[in-house]
Amino acid sequence: MFISIWSTSANLPFAAQQSRSYTSRNLMYPVCTVIFMCILLLNTPFAHATDSSNKTAQTILHILDYLSVDYGGAVLLEKVVNESEYQEQLEFSKQLALLLTKLPDHPNSENLIGQAYKIEQLVLAKASANQVSASAQLLRKEIIAAHHVSVTPKKPPDLVRAAALFQQICVKCHGVQGFGDGPESKKLDPKPANFHDMARMGQLSVYGLYNTITLGVEGTAMKAMTQLAEDERWSLAFYVSNLRNTPEYIEQGHKFWEKRAYRGPAPNLAALTTLTSNDIVLQYGEQTRAVFAYLRANPQALSLKRQSTLLFATEQLDQASAFYHRGDLVQAQRIAIAAYLEGFEPMEISIDNLDKQLRRDIEHEMMAIRQLINNGSSTIELASKVAHTKNLLFKADELLRSGKLSILGAFASALSMLLKEGIEGMLVLVASITFIVRSGHRDALVYIHTGWGSALFLGVLTWIAATLLVDISGVGREITEGVTALLASIMLIYVGYWLLDKEHTQPWQEYSRNQIGSALEKKILWAFALISFFAVYREIFETVLFYQALWSQTSDVTRPALWGGMMSAIFLLTSTGWVLFRFGIRMPPGPFFSGTSLLLAALAVIFAGQGVAALQEASLIESNRVNFISLPMLGIHPTVQTLLVQISVIGILLLSYRASLRRETL
């Protein structure tokens, strides 16, 4: 006797986690350690109570699985067709409510116990198998959600190890190929399960199989396999769940998976373990069942770093919609943000290279989803918007997977991305270096080089840490970019005003002779160093992520073109910077100061807009769209907040210019 489970998105992992402060973590670690040691040393009943609760919940789910699958073999058309089986079903149904009272209190506990009594009454009344199964499935889903029952393995199962375990332990009853015809099967009653029985196996889930392997089935030869480690039991459950599927069918599922040619939610480990084949076919169709068969045979495919994070984006949108439907708007908004920052944004450049309009449409729709959640719109409206956005994401995913980037495409993508991200930093560095050289203090260039060098070093360290040590969420990245952009904008306003003031109040040559080494001079040098740091650091981490996405779209043939595009972009940026530097050196003092001031002012406006936009993407600032042009390179985004901030910066610059002119006339 084997059992099944059906569930949706309960207890799923979220990709985007809220960051904690360094101080909080350092304070919490010793506290948590002390608490943990006290629990171990004092041997309090807490750990035992937790283990007991988990086992009780697992037993309840085991019973519900059993009722869902086997009740139909005991009752047909409100008549008992197998008395012993019916008595067993009745006994199990009576245990449900009692076991539920042993679980920790929960706001929904009374409702769960009520549902258990309803199932008992249905069995007593010899109700139809469909009624009992539906009620059991509903209760099972709510127990998993309420008590956070873990329904997934801690790591991807090892199917090679599982095959060896099956031959060592299971063959004597279930047979070499799992047909239930092992050497000892003839003397067993009931007979061992036939894992090739399509009708029965269609009702079973991997989690149900895992529970059976873990707890056994009373009154049968199926004993609890407590001698196996947890990961071995999970591996065995995955293995037997797929025995009926042929290699050809699994390969067909592989092709559907690669092409994204299936319907329904993006598969994840929880879906693989909790959805039955019948559920999948009924809701999504045969192609999706083939995809699940492939992933159950190759679960490591889910743990590998995705070539396209768009699949993750669709998964997150489904979860956001589910949380919104439950009334948890905060969680829904958080997950919707993760769908954009973790799933879509890293692929923006790649999609833009193939279909700019599609990229704009997805970006607009994902922002609209976040606005609907913020506004408390109807669940129907949100579900419709999510469905439309998912279709666009699937279209983009199919476009990306239709073929790798061509040699020209790889070169152009690498070139344009680095030029786009590097142009602003280059302009800041050129303006800073030219200013220092024009002032006659080349020895002070160390300030500028310290600024951008530190940013480069710290940026690389940040990327390494994010890749190997900690998970820096998309929200964290956007906050970092937004804050550094706004700080750079403030520093640019200050330095630009200072330069303009010096041009108007006294000749630069006189200032340079009289103010060398003064406190004011040091302040400006440090200001330039900070500007150089902010301008470079804010782009490094994002640039690396975009190149990682591009790398996944290239092959051995086209990767040299990617490197060529990157090197060409570096050459163009360096050459352009050198030309601008030489031009600035030869300019007369007046035009040089005016031009540099205008450049810094323009960069201040651009950084201000980009900083606010980044904080909007992190949902720290509201985003109210207006009918206006969108020029992200210039920091212009069609939202009220970004435009108001940029207008305010322009106003501050104009007032500063006017104040400088007024002092000149005095």
Image: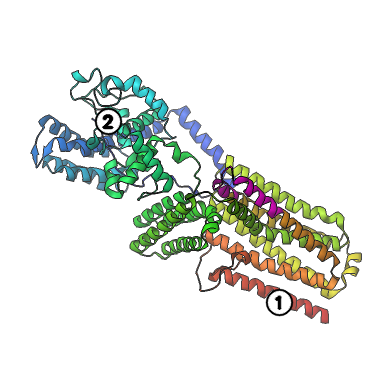
Report the span colored magenta.
547-570
Question: Which residue sits at x=74%, y=71%?
Answer: 598
Q: How many marks?
A: 2
Find the distance from the CA under tag 1 to the CA under tag 2. Answer: 80 Å
Q: Using the image, determine if residue 43 lies above or below residue 360.
A: above
The picture places residue 514, in percent across and down from the top left corner, at 91, 66
Answer whether residue 206 is visible to the viewer in this image: yes
The picture places residue 504, in percent across and down from the top left corner, at 82, 75
Is 508 a magenta residue? no
Give whichever of 330, 532 is nearer the camera: 532
Say whether residue 608 is left or right of residue 81: right
Question: Which residue sits at x=36%, y=22%?
Answer: 227
In the picture, the quarter occupied by the C terminus is: bottom right
Bin the neighbour count of mark 1 within 10 Å (Cα to Cα): few under 14, some 14-19, many 20 and up.
Answer: few
Residue 278: quarter of image: top left
Q: Which residue is mark 1?
A: 655
Residue 487: quarter of image: bottom right
Question: Which residue sits at x=30%, y=21%?
Answer: 171
Q: Are marks 1 and 2 in contact (CB under 8 Å)?
A: no
Give whichever of 493, 121 is nearer the camera: 493
The picture places residue 469, in percent across and down from the top left corner, at 58, 40
Q: Which residue is mark 2?
A: 195
